[in-house]
Image (tube, helix red, strand yellow):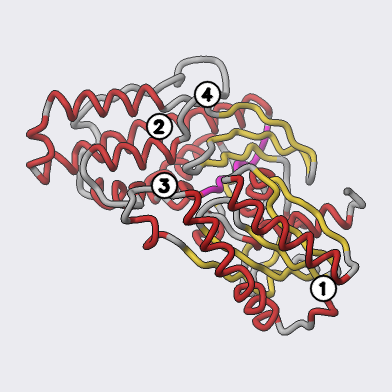
Amino acid sequence: MTVLAFETSCDETGAAVVRDGVVLANTISSQITLHAEYGGVVPELATREHLRNLPSLAKAAIETARVEWDHVDLVAATRGPGLPGALLVGLKAAQGLAFSRNIAFIGIHHHEAHLYSPWISGHPPRFDLASFSPNVSLIVSGGHTLLVHVRAPLDHKVLGETLDDAAGECFDKTARLVGLAYPGGPQLERMAEGGNARAFEFPRPLLDQANDHFSFSGLKTSVRYFVRDHPETLQNTKVRRDLCASVQAAIVEVLVTKTVRAAVRVGARAVTVSGGVASNRTLRGEIESACGKAGIVLRVAVPALCTDNAAMIGVLAELKARQGLP
């Protein structure tokens, strides 16, 4: 089965070709430079960029995969969640293409696709269904923070989610508070390098509560008041590094502790991590250490598949189609 997949949920346009679990092509166009001027994603501009880039990306994906249009059996696209205008571009393009060529179409939930990205690896990238095992999955990005118990392929239950701000949003907003450029998360991570993560004590929201939910709005507010009350912090590079390292440590501790604790509770022998924040090296290192101590296998999505991409959309679409799901 050959799948052509589109991803346009936010500010990255993606097109991919997947055949029998192998990612033959995965093309992405980022809009970081466009939105940097505004310090965040502007929905209208994102939508226009998707309209401009998707046709050429789809063509490039087909050419890279070395397949003919007549070989495409299924067209898939992200159906949500995301920016409404941005989503419509990919969704309607996929539906129109499927209708015009009289082939199947399937809409994919963005969060569900992230669950399977850690199982895509190798050269060329391949969805490793054979080694798939029950796991607790942490999906962590600018738009969402979720803990999901994946009992089997296509069988999963949400254990907890963010009650307000996602972890990635906390990274981005904190970066802005300390004067770092967009995109904030990677900038804060770089600034935190060499900083003292114990220099300042920031709250770890919901860390000690017996639930799997997350909340990062209080941490963000705490940083805001700290910067307001200590403006001299931003004038000293060393102290600024310590501040970023301390904030990062608070976010990472919450993510790692709640994820491993949930895995132990449900008896999962594996943990997976995906989403844009999964690229954070401190998070990857800390959760690897915690899983090692708990005797849990860890799989983290490769950096190229942490951010929004069409490969994971195509992989899940093919999996659903083979199971006969609508």
Residue 285: mark = 3
**Residues packed near mark 2 inside 10 Å, few (<14), some (14 to 19) or many (20 plus):** some
- Frontmost of labels 4 and 2 is 4
- The residue singled out by tag 1 in the image is 72
- Residue numbers of the magenta segment: 268-275
Q: Is residue 299 left or right of residue 250?
A: right
Residue 253: mark = 2
Three-letter code for the amino acid on which mark 2 is drawn: Glu
Three-letter code for the amino acid on which mark 4 is drawn: Leu
- The residue singled out by tag 4 in the image is 163
The residue lying toward the viewer, choosing from 287 and 102, is 102
Q: If the image is split into quadrants, where does the N terminus sit? A: bottom right
Three-letter code for the amino acid on which mark 1 is drawn: Val
- The CA span between labels 4 and 2 is 17 Å
- The numbered mark, 4 or 2, whose residue comes first in the sequence reads 4
**Residues packed near mark 1 inside 10 Å, few (<14), some (14 to 19) or many (20 plus):** many
- Frontmost of labels 3 and 4 is 4
The quadrant holding residue 8 is bottom right
- The numbered mark, 2 or 3, whose residue comes first in the sequence reads 2
Percent coordinates x, y for residue 143 in the rendering: 51, 40
- The numbered mark, 2 or 1, whose residue comes first in the sequence reads 1
Percent coordinates x, y for residue 109 in the rendering: 70, 45
- The CA span between labels 4 and 1 is 40 Å
Q: Is residue 32 magenta?
A: no
- The CA span between labels 2 and 1 is 44 Å
- The CA span between labels 2 and 3 is 11 Å
Q: Residue furthest top?
A: 209
The residue lying toward the viewer, choosing from 296 and 16, is 16
Which secondary structure lies at badge 1?
A: loop
Q: Is residue 174 left or right of residue 254?
A: left
- The CA span between labels 3 and 4 is 26 Å
- The CA span between labels 1 and 3 is 40 Å
